[in-house]
Image (cartoon, rainbow, N blue to C red):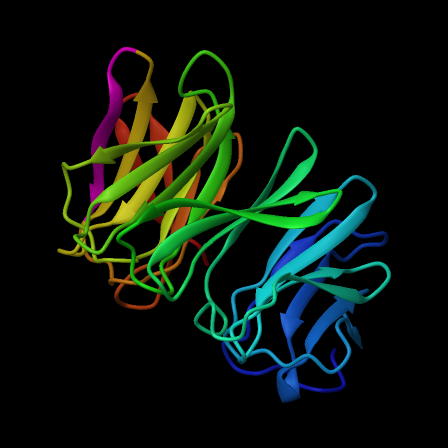
Amino acid sequence: PLATPLIPGAPLALYEAAGAWPGIITVGPGGRLMSITDGSRLAPLAGTLSFPPGAHVEFLQVGPRGHAFAVDIQGRLWDVDVDTRTAQMVEPRRGAFAPGSPLAALTDGGTPVVVTVNNASVMVAYTRTGFGWMPQSIGTGFTPGTYVASAQLPLGASPAIQIAAVNWAGQMQIWSRSTTGWTMSTIPSVLLAPGSPVEIGAGGSGPLLSAIGADGIWHAWTYGLLSGWKDVVIGPGYSLGAPLAMMPGMGTLFTVDSLGRLVMADPSATGWGVSFVH
């Protein structure tokens, strides 16, 4: 067990590590970004940088090195090398983001890309280059602190970065990156809470998207090249803002229902089956 308890509700970002336990990155007491190895060893990652207790932490493997991304209490976005425990500013402007803002991180042809929504309601993608991190505006109309989800998915002729988020009007938007920039499509079939959690990734039979509607109904969308995104209702009884997770490649979805139970949803030929994780 840990010698020092974690903050209740602390974020957890898992990564593969040597040994029986996965590596874990979290925000520890005092607001420090910490790593947990071997299930019990707690060590600081980013010196004296301070993060809010519930800060979103994203892990990304870039070649042989692991990187953690988070927004500190001053609203600055950081890239922390987990191996060397050194930090580099991605966005140095104080107040650029809400402290601890949700973000998404992935690689595009081996190049790291981090996406989040700033305090000007703009979704921004930061791409690491030989000259540092370069920002690119994707789109506007999002509330600061909006959840974003990302994946490399073939929605066209070839795989490309796909970013999913809910705008201020409660519309699900999918932003696709190409060599000429970003293109947006809207899924108008379900009203969602602005900025609410979404999940996107590769399901067992193709691209998969998930969110909880403003009415508490859990939805999943499957994608076909000819049909586009098709909405399927998983079921009612879920809370706005409930976290979502997806098992990559299988399409199994997870969330927490309004009674606090961890729920798993699996696709089948006849629809979605729901069970409780004990």
Residue located farthest toward the front when viewing the structure as drawn: 131
Whether 7 is drawn above or below 10: the answer is below
Q: Is residue 59 left or right of residue 173?
A: right
Which quarter of the image is occupied by the N terminus?
bottom right
Q: Position of residue 35 (x, y in %)?
A: 74, 68
Q: Position of residue 218 (x, y in %)?
A: 24, 47
Q: Position of residue 272 (x, y in %)?
A: 29, 34
Say which residue appears at 40% left-offset and 51% top-offset. Answer: 123
- Image quarter of residue 186: top left
Is 94 in front, or is 198? 94
Q: Is residue 129 visible?
A: yes
Is 197 in front, or is 90? 90
Q: Is residue 215 left or right of residue 49?
A: left
Say which residue appears at 29% left-offset and 40% top-offset. Answer: 173
Q: Is residue 250 visible?
A: no
Magenta stretch: includes residue 228: yes
Q: Is residue 144 left or right of residue 89?
A: left
Is 110 in front, or is 122? 122
> Bounds of the magenta span?
226-235
Whether 112 is drawn above or below 19: the answer is above
